[in-house]
Image: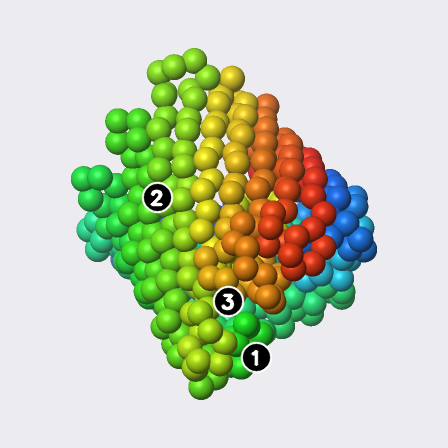
Amino acid sequence: MLSAALALAAEAPPRPDPPPPPDPPAITVSGEVRERVTWQSAIGFDADDPDAGLVWTQRIALAADADLAPVIRARAALVSALIQGGDETSPVERNVLDLQEAFVELGPREAFVRLGRQEIRLGSQRLVAMRDGTTVRRTRDGARGHAALGKLELDAFALRLVAVRPEGVFNDGRNEGRDLAGVQASFPTPLGKIEAYWLRTTQDNRPTIEGTADERRHSWGLRAAGEARGWFWDWEAVFQTGRFGTATIRAWTLATKTGYRWESRAWKPEVMLSANIASGDGARGDGRLATFSALYPNASYFSEDAVLGPANFFNLHPYVTVHPREDLSLGLDFNLFWRLKRTDGVYTPQGGLLRAPGNARARFVDAALSGVAEWAPREGLLLSLVFTHSRPQDFIRASGPADPSDFVEATLQFTF
């Protein structure tokens, strides 16, 4: 009996090995340290503004990305933003410690839904940007979906702006009444890329040239960008509709950048002309708000000296850039800025009214010369120096303080 049992056991197939334990989630850690010193002789063309002078800012960010499963990913990011000098209570420059991002992505990378707190930027960032130039970047709570269908890419999103509370820790909240929703489609063409989008934004109790009311604005946009044979371009047109209280919204803009790059020449020189125009309000109290809104642009829309925004204006903005070395770039630009409608004022990059029109008839607002140097001596390390001299023109002189402004900004940024 024993020998028969041994023979039967010898003929039985071996037991399969137990399955290996699942791989731990793949986690990638990244971060940033940015130290910046800024000196500005005047704020809003006013040398007596108490926030003028020397300002130091610091941003420290730490993020972790994890692949939890083949179709599940997650990201969490912390940020600390500090300021000394200037407006030390500003929510765009100070946030002691808080959660910048915390989201989960469900689905393959070609077609996913992202849920939670997240940053978002669209296209050229003329209308929706993270606002990287300030110490505190914008972040939002909500959902975003992405799908790549061959060469066509689709994005849809519904997000609410996070309300930053400068003091305290982990106390940021939702900014009620500041919602962003939309759809964007992009696809390649023989001459670059085309983007078409629709955005819906809400802002309760928004102050404008027409008074203060709840705003519901729709932005319909088309962008074409590309490069060929040394030429490069980025053109974008936007038409806006909606309601401002009981008034209708009808506004528009056309923004263009066109340039040429000599890649085979010494220093790789590059020239570019930016020409832009945006509508202003024609007559107050006529039941129509015609001032274009750039929604959520970069604060440094025209230069790092973020004074003027793209509303009720037209401007010419030529650039020259050279690269003496692979790790060094030098740039010079000159910005000429006029207001379009004499019945409307001029605005800050965030859409606030900087100067009301009053009885001033002049159009010429400002002439500013800027220079920038950027040096990247090693991967992840960037040092930059920016200088701007801004000389206010007829409209500013006719509507209030008109002090020339000198702006200097030195930045050290390390990313890993």
- Looking at the rendered image, the disc whose residue lies closer to the viewer, 3 or 2, is 3
Q: CA distance from mark 3 to mark 1?
A: 18 Å
Amino acid carrying label 1: it is: Thr
Mark 1 burial class by Cα count in 10 Å: few <14, some 14-19, many 20+ = few
**Percent position of residue 166, x then y:** 72, 63
Q: Which residue is mark 3?
A: 343
**Residue at point 37% right, 62% down?**
252
Residue type at numbered disc 3: Thr
* For discs 3 and 1, the disc positioned in front in the rendered view: 3
Give the CA separation, mark 3 to mark 2: 30 Å
Query: Is the Cβ of the residue at disc 3 closer than 8 Å to that at disc 1?
Result: no
Q: Report helix, strand or loop for mark 3.
A: loop
Q: Upstream in the sequence, badge 3 or badge 1?
A: 1
Instruction: Please name the residue shown 58% across and 35% down the image.
Output: 370
Q: Decide which of 153, 312 is in the foreground and name it.
A: 312
Identify the residue at image location x=49%, y=21%.
323
N-term mark: 3 or 2: 2
Disc 1 and disc 2 in contact, CB within 8 angstroms: no
